Amino acid sequence: MLSRHNPQLNANGELIHLLSIDGLPRDVMTHILDTAGTFLSVNDREVKKVPLLRGKSVFNLFFENSTRTRTTFEIAAKRLSADVINLDIARSSTAKGESLLDTIANLSAMHADMFVVRHSESGAPYLIARHCAPHVHVVNAGDGRHAHPTQGLLDMYAIRHYKRDFAQLSVAIVGDIVHSRVARSDIHALTTLGVPDIRAVGPRTLVPGDLGEMGVRVCHDMGEGIRGADVIIMLRLQNERMSGAMLPSAGEFSKTFGLTPAKLALAKADAIVMHPGPINRGVEIDSSVADGSHSVILPQVTFGIAVRMAVMSIIAGNEA
Amino acid sequence: MRILITDGRVVDPASGRDERADVAIDAGRIVAIGRAAPDFEPARRIDASGCIVMPGLVDLAARLREPGREHEGMLESELKAAAAGGITSLVCLPDTEPPLDEPGLVEMLKFRARKMSSCRLFPLGALTRGLEGEVLTEMAKLSEAGCVGFSQADRPVRDTMVMLRAMQYAATFGHTVWLRPQDGWLGKGVAASGAVATRLGLSSVPVAAETVALHTIIELVRATGARVHLCRLSSSAGVALVRAAKAEGLPVTADVSVHSLHLTDDDIGYFNADMRLTPPLRQGADRDALRAALADGTIDALVSDHNPVDDDAKNLPFAEAEPGASAVELLLSLALKWGQEMGLGLPRTLARVTSDPVRVLGAGLGPLSASAGRLVEGGVADICVADPAATWQVTREALTSQGKHTPFDFAASGTALPGRVRATVLAGGMSFEAR
């Protein structure tokens, strides 16, 4: 069907929106990671700015609260010299009954050049990309359970930084995968980059068997899941899922699937431990692991700014 | 009015008649099929050369949105749309606002529909008051007001004791209970469980939502003897359960929507909200099983599942978008497309949208049941004249329905549909003529 046309690419196959890693060609992804590498040095300079987005207006539209992700996008846009406008929509117009597309139309009338969108519903950034003016670019900063593509890309940046090559890796993703947009974006990125062994680890309520159709090996045993892994990505367990029909308690999750030094010892000696943050110490990850020598959780945050600069500068340079 | 339909290919699925003939109509009845009497002087002639002349279509599932959702559809707009689709009898669901649980509401709908002379309207009454699944409705009174059966629409009764009582009570008076098999707890998602829902991060409805409900309903049919019509089957496993229930001789019938017959969850593409439907689209194997079951008669009828939805309700993130699509105008085309793809021939294809749905309605139709959905001399003149060779592109402009959303929109599908209705005759009068 015609509606299957990948909306994040233009007719020349260039990136005009970043909506998902699903359907992102490998060369585009590699280009983003390479570009992020050049921006990493900008962050070390005394004057941390380049003029690539000078005169452009970037609107941060967070329909769902997230101080951390919004801040990293704001820093990235400012380092590209863009004007940044933060809108905390969860507490403003939609609370007054304005529809999503009306909000977008109004902000477009203020001459927005780029929308960075976080929304609680899967697919919301696609709707916005379909209805905004052709010169406006959309970056998905997390939609429902669907995708968090800049997180996926920064995770790939971190893996490439520490492991160099994707072709021989074993990567374990542990925790609440079914509800995780980070896990989906990581899985698409890892399969696109040719990682041969991706494991999705957790109880059956959080890691259903049909995840296998995304190209991962489903493991319901933590030991089997992380044995010999080069990379362990721990996911955040949302508070509302710690006790209910998905899991009996945070304590039981910590006991069975939390990452402790003893379980980490099953992974490769030089394994890295990643987490998209914010972490629940003592739930999915032990403090001694989060702060330990295998952890690259804080470098992930630093890479995140460079990756977001790369994404914004690349899509702003391409036309629909 | 005297009407003469000349030179068409007359197809009557019920009798198997398939021949070139004229059809003469007088005073609301078919007076001759073949050659009209020499002294028959028609006020209207319809040249049907190249067209099929068939019974008016009978659609067992449509929402007209009135009362309560007039901004999405009105009785007048949707009945006109039905006539444009060649439909002469339409069953509407009780989940209006307020629900059809009061005889007065049903009488009002029937009265207004009759005045419009676009299409016969047969409401389903609410099975429980307010569709809340707790208190039975006054089925005898509702039936007298014109209800042809009783239904919960998409609001399953969670309390199985209420379900048992409702079926016992309906069976007392010989009423059919129309149920969409969907477990109230398992059926809360927005897409079918499977690779697509997993990849898109959409909450999902497992097949068990349908099969658990079917097991319960079938067991209660065994216990009560109630006659049940199973609405909108969506899965291969569901089809197997219905096939077994029929083989056992239980009094059940079933239908499938045009959407489940032609589409799969893959068609959701990049969150296309026009594919947000209830029940959700399932996988290719399910669609194949539904197509085969409709062909072999396990599924009795093909329905439009028409539900006009406005732009405001569709231009939302997928899960928030209102489920439904305009479909009465597509029913014939999508039946023909299925029949062609299955190699069934016209009589077998058309039976599923004419005589078979009338069989499902049974005694509910009253005196009409003898000739609705059929072409017989002396019978009621509800007729559809359609050009099977013509194709058309479904666009917003081409639709009469107030709702403009359908998965078959040409802009999205790039596919034209076969078959175009040229004229619809209702009770011997013209209810639709193509310009």
Image (cartoon, coloured by chain):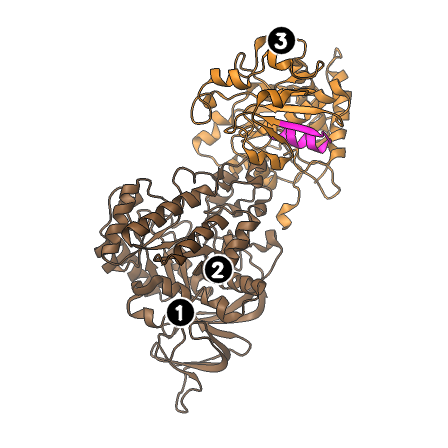
Chain colours: A orange, B brown
Residue behind mark 2: B294
Left or right of B271? Residue B82 is left
Task: Indicate which disc residue B373 carries.
Answer: 1
Q: Amino acid at mark 2?
A: Leu
Identify the mark nearer the N-term, 1 or 2.
Answer: 2
Residues drawn in magenta: A184-199
Give how far across and how far down residue A78 sits, in percent: 67, 20
For the point 23% across and 51% down, the residue is B169
Q: How far is mark 1 from mark 2, CA to CA?
A: 18 Å
* Quadrant of the rendered image containing residue A157: top right
What kind of element bears circle 3?
loop
Left or right of B430? Residue B368 is left
Same subunit under labels 1 and 2?
yes
Q: Amino acid at mark 3?
A: Asp
Give how far across and how far down residue B149 sits, in percent: 31, 56
Using the image, name the chain to which the residue with label 3 belongs: A
What kind of element bears circle 1?
loop
